[in-house]
Image: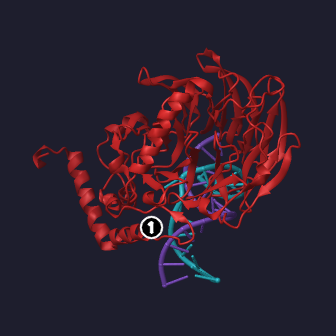
Chain colours: A red, B purple, C cyan
Amino acid sequence: MAPEKLTEYEQQRLQNIKRNEEMLAALKIRSKVSELSTATKRQRAETKSYKVSPEKKQKTETPIVLRRSLRTRGMPPDSSTDETPKSSPKEDLESILKEEPFSGPISMASACRTVGSDKKLLEIILSSSRNAKRSMSDDAICDSNNGILGNEDFVSSKGGKIGRLVDIKGLKLEQRNVARVVHGRIFTVRFFPARDTRVVVVGNKKGDIGFWNIDAEDEDGDGIHVYHPHSAPVSGILFDSFSLSKMFSSSYDGFVRLLDIERGIFDLVYSNDDGVFSLSQKPDDMKSLYFGGPNGEMNVWDARAGKSVFSWHLHEDRINTIDFNSQDTNNMATSSTDGTVCIWDLRNIGAEGPTSLRTVTHRRAVHSAYFSPSGAFLATTSLDDRIGLLSGENLEDLSMIHHNNQTGRWLSPFRGIWGWDDSQLIIGNMSRGIDVISTSKKNVVATLKSECMTAIPCRFDVHPYEIGTLAAATSGGQVYVWEQS
DNA sequence: TCAGTCCTTACCCTA
DNA sequence: TAGGGTCCAGGACTGA
């Protein structure tokens, strides 16, 4: 654009940017940032770790403006007409050091942050995707929390599937199954839901998504490949059960992206200015996405229509998780920072949204609410140091189990997940362990510990096909994969 | 009542 | 090995 065509605001913005450049030069911040980038290349000898691509680290040089809505900034709607930037030098400095999300499709090649070819990884995923399509009609049933259950499931007394019984207490961790997949705090961890592969996918606070092919052969190095499709914490990762080469990811940056591995693109499917803090899908409807916002609102996005078809205000604060009952997929549970867990009936939708069937109140924020594999239980995890367990015909019975959930500021809050059946819950332990909670005894029956696990595991996922394979992720970017011995 | 401040936690990196 | 930096979560407390 020619200089004479710039608006007054644009000219002022350019002056700000120039001033900030001078300030950065004076403070030598660029060199410090460069030093920090270089520092991330340090490798730890004892574990597998990703290898950062040096040329990709230069992108932080671009001056940007933090993308936030007027509402989240506490500004009235008409303040957008005020063209005079009022940011202080400190705020300008902060905005420069932060990253603006890119509001378009991103190729995997440009998003890649690791050295080495990812060809092998992509081949494995595409091959697994093709195999899954062939076998899908036989025995796969998707579950939004615990993945996909096969045809060997046990059946509960209520007639529902309860997964496969496994003794979690017998799991072992070996050094070869330890890796630093990404840098920094992991918010989300998922197994790639295929029978013939063991690939862990994690999302961290910086917006990176890391893939770790646990059984990587030598030509694939450590099997770790990291991409950077988001600019803020990754709040959710979902695989399309009918096409495993497609993966949804959501982020605090307000974007929901669809990774299409066949096309090699992180496509943009949805964006807002407030952030997306939880992501889920109805098990029987892969064409709809459910995601929660910072103020208790939930959106339902329809892939066929390509737009948000519902927007409901369900809570007074952030929605942390959304989950569906595998036996009655119209039953949805949401957990919120407002201290409540609600179960909703999606068949009865009024002007205010779906009908609330049940509300569980905790004394502090609730960070998860997950239905058990059979749908007979619901487990909630709260910062009030309690794990709620709902049971009974209509989940009317509530038990509270004491558990230390005080993770503090630097760890992702614990979220109790279900094992492969209804009998056990898995949750982090502040003593660098993994607690196994029995739903019948309603207490911790075992704590998995290993010398290889040098940090506190906060987030977990169970492999949907390999019974006894458990992924535990930490706030330091490590992933531990426990196996049956 | 609301806005602002303070405090808590674990982990990584560097000297 | 000690100590500084991280930081964007969330609750307690304080004062207007």
- Vertical arrangement, residue A479 with respect to residue A73, above or below: below
Name the quadrant containing residue A33: bottom left
Residue A451, x across and y down, in percent: 70, 67
- Vertical arrangement, residue A343 with respect to residue A208, above or below: above
Q: What element carries label 1?
A: loop
Residue A162, x across and y down, in percent: 76, 32
* Residue A189 visible in the shown view: yes
Residue at 24% over, 46% down? A9
* Residue A275 visible in the shown view: no
Residue A146, x across and y down, in percent: 65, 37
Q: Nearer the viewer, residue A34 or A248?
A: A248
Residue A155, x across and y down, in percent: 78, 27
Name the quadrant containing residue A246: top left
In-image side of A64 versus A51 (left or right): left
Quadrant location of the N terminus of chain A in the rendered image:
top left
Q: Which of A72 and A210 is in front in this view?
A: A210
Residue at 79% over, 22% down? A159
The residue that label 1 is drawn on is A40
Quadrant location of the C terminus of chain A in the rendered image:
bottom right
